[in-house]
Every structure is written in C-alpha cells, then in structure tokens.
Amino acid sequence: MPRNLTAEELRKNSLTTIKAACAEDAEFAWIEAAEGEQKLKKFSITAYTGVPMRVGFGYPIVVDLAGMKIAGESTPILKDHDPAKIVGHTDTVDKSVKRLKLTGIVSGVGEAAQEVVALGANGFPWQASIGASIELMEFVDKGESVTVNGRAISGPVYVARESTLRETSFVPIGADAGTSGRIAAQLHERKVAIMDPELKAHIESLNFDPAALSEAQVSGLKAAFEKSKQKPVEKTQTIDEIIAANAAEHDRITAFDEIMRTATVGRARHETDELLKTYRAAIEGKWDVMKFSLAMKQDSRFNVAIHTNGNKDQFPKAEVLEAAICKQGRLNDLEKKFSPQILEAADKHIRKEGVGLTQLYIVCAEANGYRGRMSRITEEVQRYAFAHDPRMMVQASGFSTISIATILSNIANKFLMDGWNAVDMTPMRIAAITSVNDFKEITTVSLTGDLQFEKVGPAGEIKHGSLGQTTYGNRADSYAKMLAITFQDYRNDDLGALTRTPRRLGRGGALKLNDIFWTEFLNPTTANFFHSSNANVNTGVADMTIGGLTATEVIFMNQTDPDGKPLSLEPKILLVPPALKALALALTDPQGRLITGASATLPDVNVFRGRFRVESSPYLANALYTGYDAAAWYMQADPADLPVIEIVALDGRVEPVIETADADFNTLGTQLRGHNHVGVRVQEPRAAVRADGGSS
C-alpha cells in the first residue's frame, strides 16, 4: 500500500521543495498588452496539468492539486526560479481537479521581465514551471496504483499530497521534453483567415499554427515573406557603414567572450571543450547575442541525448552515472537493471570521461548550484551535493537536478542485493514468509482445524467450520550495521568504496538471517518440536536410500489432524546437509535412471524420480549451532501448504535496504546504513519429519 514519507525521509531525500515543469498537455503561456494607460502587459499561464513529472528524484513525482494550498492570490512570477529575476505577479489563481491556471501582470522592471516579453514577442516557446514546498509526501511502490488529479497513476511514483504554491516561473526548457508554450503580443486580438496558400505554407514551415495567429501577426509575417521574395539590391557600403559594422562585430564578439567566461566557471575540461565548439559555431554563423546566450544556458552537461530509430529521447545523467558506476563495479545481471539505451550511454561516458567518486560528487554539487573550481571533494562540495544549504532549492527549470542521496542509495542497494544473493538463501525457499506492519507479537492459528465439507441440509443451511485450537507466535526484530565512505576514499577517488561497502552490508544481512533461522530450526529444545510426541521423527530406517525415503514418507503420510483423520498432504522438499546432497539429487533425478538391486520387493526403477525438490545448507552440519547433525535430514511439505517454519518481515521485505547520508557536521565522509526487520519461529510440527540418518 502507498505510504507517507516521514519528515526525516523528506529531509534525507531532498524532497522538501520541488520546482516542477508543467506537463506535456499544458496550454500556452500568453502575454498581452494591458488596457488603459498603465501599459503593463498581462499574462495567462496553465502552470501544471496534474500528470507525473521527472524532476531528479529517481522516480516520477505528481503534485496532488487537491492538497495544494495557494500562498496568496498574488504570487510571484519569476524567471528560472531565481528570486532575483522578477517577471511579475498573479491577480487570479484558478485551481481545478486536473489543472492549475494563473493570470496576472508583468510588473517586473528588470532584465528578466524584459527578456521574457521580448523573446515572447519574437515567438520564443517559453514553458511554465511551478515552485512549491512539500509538507506531506507519499511513495507508491512498483505494482501499486493510486488516483491523483482524476488520473490513475501506476507506481513507482512520489505523490506530493500536501504542498503550498510559492511561485511560478517562465523557463526556456522544462524537465518534461513534451512541454510547450508560447508568448503572444495580444491574447484576445482578432484572428484573420489566410487565403494565400503560399503564405500559409510558409507560416506552417516556421512551426506556427495559422489559425491561432492574430491579424497583426499575420501582417508582420506576410511583410517578411514578401520581402524575402524580393531580389536584393546591390549596395556599396560607405566608410562610415564599414566602421559601424566592424564596431558592431567587435561588440558582438566581446559579449560572446563575457558569456563564455561565465558559462565555463567550474566546468571540467571536457565540458569546456564542448562549449568552445558552440562558441566557434556561433562566431562563424553570425549568431546574435541572445541566441548564443540561450545556447550556453541550454547545454547538456546534466543530460545525455540518445538517438534510437530516429527518435530523440533524453535520459537524466543521474541514471547514466549509476549505470556507469555499476558497470565498472561489475554488478551482476546489469542488463536486467538498466535499459539498453542507458547502458549504451554509460559505455560512451566511461570511454570519454571515466567515472569516480570525485566526479560523481562534483557533478551533483554543480546540479545543486555549486560554482566553485574545486577538482576534489571538500566540505563545501559535499554540502552542495547533499543540498543541505537552505538556499539550494531543487529546480526543474531547463534540466533535471541530480540528487547525490538518490544516486548513492540506488547504487548501494543494487550492490547490496549482489552481496545478499551471494550467500546461501535456503531459508527463503523452505519457510513461509509473512508480512507484518509493526513489531508486536503476532498469533497464527493452526490450519489443521475442522474444515472438512459437510452435506448441506434440506433448508440449505451451511454449517460453520472451526480453526484449530493450536496457535503459533512470531515477531519481527530490527537488525542493522553501519559503514562509511571515508575521507581517505574521497582523496584516493576510490570508486570501489561505493561498490564493496554495500556488497558487504548485503552479505552481512544475509548471514544474520541464516544465523537466526538455523538457530531456531536446529534447536532441539524449541518446544520439543521434532519429537516422538509429535510423530515427526524417524529413528528406524532413516538413511538416504530408497528404503530410508520410503520409511520417512510413511511417517509423513500417516500424520493426522486433531480429529484423527489423515492430514492428506504430500511432502515436497528434501532438506539435507552437504554430505547427502549428491545422493539426494541422484535418488530424485527427474530423468529417473534405473537403480539395480534396490530391494527384493521393489522393481529395479527409481520410484522417487522427480518427487522432491532438494534443498541443502551447510548450517545443518555446522558444529557452532546446537542440534547440528551431518547425517540427519528432513522431509517437509511445501511452506505454502503447511509451514514448518515462518519468517516474518516488516512490510513483507526480508531483504535489507541501504540508506545514505553525509557524516556528522564538519566530518568529511558518507555513511551507509543497512537494515532489515525480520523474525523467525517454528510453526506446524506436522509439516515435516526429521530422519536421523541412521546415526542413532
């Protein structure tokens, strides 16, 4: 079921504030001239359409409009979520089930407001982006669904159930590549039909909708079109014109140089090289200053473009970095955890740039606003990477942000499962696994009660059955271990610290599960579980032979319910110590080769072929565990039918998880905490028979 994130989880996941671009079906953002002498322009924006967005949290996020509060009727309108770049303010806010609409006045007097209006008049496709603080976040896991904003949303997804709208921004490129928006000179200006097919085709070639243009816009486009068809008249430049042109070119290059200096601050060498290519192309292509400035803002250092079958899909660099690190750490089953496109991009990234702890932290710090020139991890870099400075606001204007906490947790949990799966997991295959919601003792009633059907009476009455009187208990406890990526790991740029440490935590969690499981299973004093009083032991012909299997199966099949009637359960599992594993596999070989001389009373054929699933664990014969026996073995029912032993797990997750956080204040390092919450208890004695192997 969906669960709410706690305040601590919100802080750790850097989800206390979100700035989210409007969705792909958002309407246009308009600006028009106001009536009267005020001469201020108005705008109308569909700021959000209620669909999930990818804004750098690892999973998509959807803002629940029903739970969104509006800070006030007059809310700020900014550019790029920058409080210093004021565009205007709202005068009305219209929030419906599926859509958030705003109207207001361009009251800003600075460069930001002028740029938004000027570029809009030129047809630049502005997009809208909301800035909201989050008070209550819910996580919907994979395989679950939730209804938000009138839509059915499938997990995994974050749902911002309670939020407050703080501001809305004009942005050049939103986090959602499908977002679109325009600015027009007038919102309600009279439209005009275009009769000239040649002019209409020309306007459509410029990606304008002829039916949506005003009369003034059509007139301007027509004039430009007619002028473009005229043959240019040769004109000889005067000396003054040549001097003016040279001065203008000098000013253009000077402006380019200043923009270039700003854009390259804090950049790595390979990023600077890419910007230089754009710079040279702009000089040779005679770009104007505005076009070059936008190109510098829209560079792709936080995104990797991948072309597949002619379509351009953008993947956040965070996922590419994760794949690159997992590939270099030799994570098993890599192709099952990342798409082919992401792995292809990761290969290119490794070949071109490599990857290390230093690069990972600096890229994440830069995504959160760091603009220093450090080439190693410092306290400042770490603070920015984890976004602990309250001035660092998670933004989705232009590019997806990168969360170091999310990346570290995603990578760590993948390598944790590698370590977990490397340990013997027999307990997971022979036990029932039950989900619990808390750490209280639970009680399970035996499944061997009076459940046999009875004949329905003449009046159609149906008799009630009754569960058994025997009950079994269990309770989950917490188990954890903490390790750290240290200052020395940072200085050595040791990427292995990020892959080895989680593997060790995963292995540690698996070893602890085995320890508590086999301590419970083998302990002969556990309520005299395997005991003659329970008719679940074989001390006669009990070796791993056809005779031993036959005798043990007879004991199993003779088990009865509390009323003395046959239990009627087929045994499914043979649990054996390592010394008997090969023999058990041979005796139950599904191919069923002939066995000669089996018995004077049995035919020469393997009667047990394919009858059992063989499980084996070294813990059965380990002298450190009370009740161990290298010769004893067990025949048991499928745990789904009748469990001989049960594992309870908080929220149904037996496997551990890793959480990451930076170390204590003024300590350079990253802590990794692995934990799980499980309990183990024997359950139904009738579900298994212990054969002593003929050792007694």
Image (spheres, grey):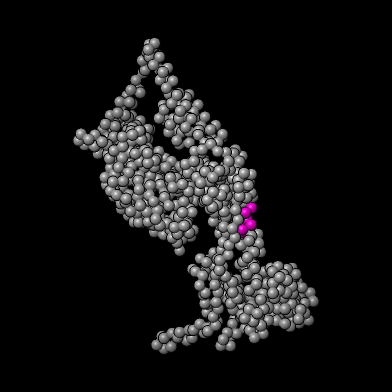
Q: Residue at x 64, y 53 (%)?
A: 500
Q: Residue at x 46, y 46 (%)?
A: 389
Q: Residue at x 69, y 74 (%)?
A: 626
Q: Quadrant of residue 297?
A: top left
User: Residue 667 appears at what percent x and percent y?
Assistant: 56, 49
Name the one closer to the observer, 48 or 56: 56
Q: Tell me which segment is drawn in magenta.
A: 500-506
User: Residue 177 appears at what percent x and percent y?
Assistant: 43, 43
Residue most extreme to the right: 597
- Residue 501 magenta-highlighted: yes
User: Residue 430 appears at what percent x and percent y?
Assistant: 62, 70
In the rendered structure, the answer to whether residue 538 lies left or right of residue 268 reads: right
**On-image quarter of the N terminus:** bottom left
Q: Residue at x 59, y 81 (%)?
A: 568
Say above or below: 20 vs 265. below
- Is the magenta region chiefly helix, strand or loop? helix
Name the one closer to the observer, 109 or 201: 109
Q: Is residue 525 visible?
A: yes
In the rendered structure, the answer to whether residue 264 lies left or right of residue 34 reads: right
Residue most extreme to the left: 36
**On-image quarter of the C terminus:** bottom right
Say above or below: 479 vs 627. above
Name the one closer to the observer, 346 or 296: 296
Q: Is residue 302 visible?
A: no
User: Residue 9 appears at what percent x and percent y?
Assistant: 47, 57
Say above or below: 292 vs 349. above
